[in-house]
Amino acid sequence: MYTENRATAVFHPLTEPEFMQPLCTKSIKEIFSSCSDFESRQIDLGLENKISVTVCWLDGTVLGTEVSASVIRPLTQAVRSGVCHDELSAASRAMQGGVYCCSAKMYDNCDDTVYALTHGHCAVIFDGIGKALCFELRSPHMRAVSEPTLEKTLKGAKDSFVENLRSNTFLVRRRISSPKLKLVESDVGRKSRTRVAVMFMDGVAAPETVGELAKRLDQLDIDALLALGILEESLSDHPRSPFPQFIHTERVDRFAMHLMDGRIGILVDGLPVGLVLPVTLAEFMKVTGDSSMHYIISSAITLLRYFALVLSIVLPGFYVAVAMYHQELIPTKLLLSIIEAKQNVPFSTAIEVLGMMVAFSLLQEAGLRLPTPVGDTVSIIGALIVGQSAVEARVISPIAIIVVALSGIAGYALPSQDMGYAVRLLRFMLVLAAIIGGLYGVGLCLCVLIFTLSSMDSFGVNYTAPLSDGSPGGLRRLLLREPKTQNKFRDPALNTPDKRRQK
């Protein structure tokens, strides 16, 4: 299943042969019946036209002009000289350089031939010997490399991943020009046979983590891999947890930084996003631009993010608990102001906060799903007109709007959108706990949250590291960033063979 030394790692996916027919032109045409993009052409080779082959390809995955120039023309010229007298000699001649293509493979079964055709190859079928020559002629049609749309930075690179797997691996290798950057590909999905590339730095990434990832990929048995969620739920240690267990990034430079830190990256053909593992909660509070800033400024912004995280989770629940059960904690002037604002409001504090949180979530989802101009308009209308009208109509108290809005804005300060969804869910849970038990309910819910996070692992790395990895100075390393010249060691939680990143 998996073999490894310090230079290689081999993944063997669980894929079974699907097309068991003998390899011939008829069987290939039967397999691709009702496929309008399947093209084939029979060609007679040799001086006496005794050799007949069939050239077939899928229009769109390869270009017809490339088939004519790189396969048909050189193949006919090579055998027209009279050197090839039968199909076996013609196939050998083509494999030895008779066809102008850098990648040429010979197959003797339908399964491999069909796989090659669907992945951008042109097949030359020799029915007499039951073999097919497949030449890689992938179509260059793809989306150009563009700027990141979700992870923007001022001082970082401006290129991001695209839907083409080979283009993505090239972008990573352009940043890490080392033979120690290992790239292992496998096929996932019995029907889709989607290519998945696993990238890691040999000697830096922990061999145990690479082996565990290989084992889980081998055990992945699905029909098709068309979304990242399928891969995440199948590979994660805690698939039922709402907390993200993979780093999603569209930035090539961030992906390469994680590889150099000792993590493992996953790229999926057709998806312009890279996955990184193992992860900790602290990684979701970092952005690529932190490494380009002065360490004092970066540390200050990191502290601000953690403050925003706590504020976004705790503030609505704390306000509900204090307003309903612990009014003695509120200063007198503020309490009188709250009482005056709520005199004509017909709803309780709990209903107010829950209603505003639901409305805020609806506005957020509407802004994400609608086109940009319409989404901005909906957000402005919801925030200004509807909110102001609700206050003037005395349906909602101003303090409830302030609390929910401040909590939502603090959630926007989180770098990870996946972590933002988990925080939004926790916000509702703490409000419900506050309604039931006041501050005691909030405290109990927070204890359960801390216990849950500290019991989670990501490929052998504790989710709350560096607070729980046993090394000294965990809180300092979590909140503060050292100068680059003093940050000489990699994260000890990753258990990397090469501990030092600089001498």
Image: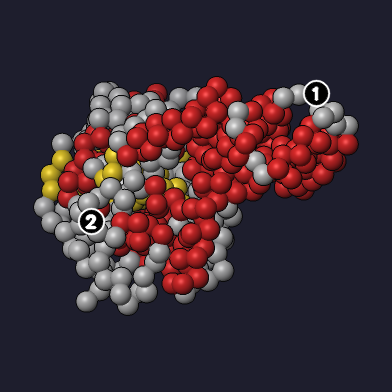
The percent position of residue 361, horizontal first and vertical second, equals 65, 35
Identify whether 291 is placed above or below 391.
below
Instruction: Work out whether residue 350 or residue 146 is closer to the camera in this orientation and state it.
Output: 350
Q: Amino acid at mark 1?
A: Pro
| Residue 14 appears left or right of 288 | left
Which residue is located at x 39 percent, y 44 percent? 246
Q: Residues within 10 Å of mark 2 (few under 14, many from 20)?
A: few
Tell me the quarter of the image containing the C terminus.
bottom left
Residue 30 seen from this side: yes
What SS does tag 2 mark? loop
The residue under label 2 is 471
The reply to whether discs 1 and 2 touch (Cβ–Cβ < 8 Å) is no
Identify the coloring. secondary structure
Q: With 24 as the anchor, is 303 left or right in this view?
A: right
Residue at (82, 30) in percent of width and height: 343
Name the residue tied to disc 1.
346
The x, y position of residue 107, in whole percent, is 24, 39
1 or 2: tag closer to the N-terminus: 1
Query: Which amino acid lies under the numbered mark 2 shown in the image of this protein?
Result: Ser
Quadrant hosting residue 487: bottom left
